[in-house]
Image (cartoon, grey):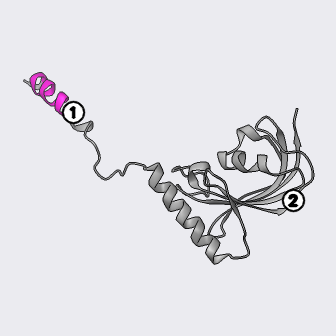
Amino acid sequence: MKKILFLFLLPLAIFSSCSKNSDVVPYDAAKQAAIDDATIKTYLTAHPEITNVKDTLGVYYQVITPGTGVYPTDASTINVNYTGTLLDGTQFDANTNYSQTLGNLILGWRIVLPHVRTGSKVLMLIPSVYGYGNYATGKIPPNSVLLFSVTLIAPNNQ
């Protein structure tokens, strides 16, 4: 009798574990992009000292100090000094003389840095979709707009 009861309850347990959780809200990239853009515009309104260029993909950046060197490509190994913060001022990362292939960095950097020459200092406001998306990473909450101050020391265009 116990075997029959077990065989009857096993499929019931399996099917009930497959039910959907109605509390989970699906990620809507277009909606998040609109939220990020509004957040960036609000931030820029509160910081009129920042003049910016909006890339066609939605990344905002300001060249603070123009450089005179070469433009990096995705294949370039770049050397940079940078600070990364959230819009509330929380610093999540900083590095001096950081070296990496541009193509291996977050998409926001890959969008902006090919527009600036070696020696440039640039401020980037990166929507979450071009940063870490809807995933938390260290001190970075999901769906965070990122603010980077980057000085491009040298790309090696080999």
Tell me the crowding category of disc 2: few under 14, some 14 to 19, or many 20 or more residues within 10 angstroms, Cα based: some
Q: In this view, does 121 lie above or below 154?
A: below
Task: Say if the magenta span includes residue 6.
Answer: yes
Task: Say if the magenta span includes residue 81.
Answer: no
* Nearest to N terminus: mark 1 or mark 2: 1
Which span of residues is magenta-colored? 3-12
Residue 146: which quarter of the image? bottom right
Front label number (1 vs 2): 2
Q: How far apart are marks 1 and 2 (CA)?
A: 62 Å
Measuring from the top left, give residue 151's x and y in whole percent: 84, 56
Q: In this view, does 4 lie above or below 12?
A: above
Where does label 2 land, which residue? Answer: 66
Q: Residue at x 92, y 49 (%)?
A: 69
Q: Which residue is drawn at 71% across and 45% down?
A: 110
Q: Which residue is drawn at 38% across and 48% down?
A: 26
Where does label 1 land, which residue? Answer: 15
Q: Quarter holding the N terminus?
A: top left
Q: Report if residue 27 is visible in the image.
A: yes
Tell me which secondary structure the magenta stretch mostly adopts: helix
Measuring from the top left, give residue 39's x and y in whole percent: 55, 66
Residue 76: which quarter of the image? top right
Number of residue marks: 2
Q: Which amino acid does label 1 sit on?
A: Phe
Residue 4: which quarter of the image? top left
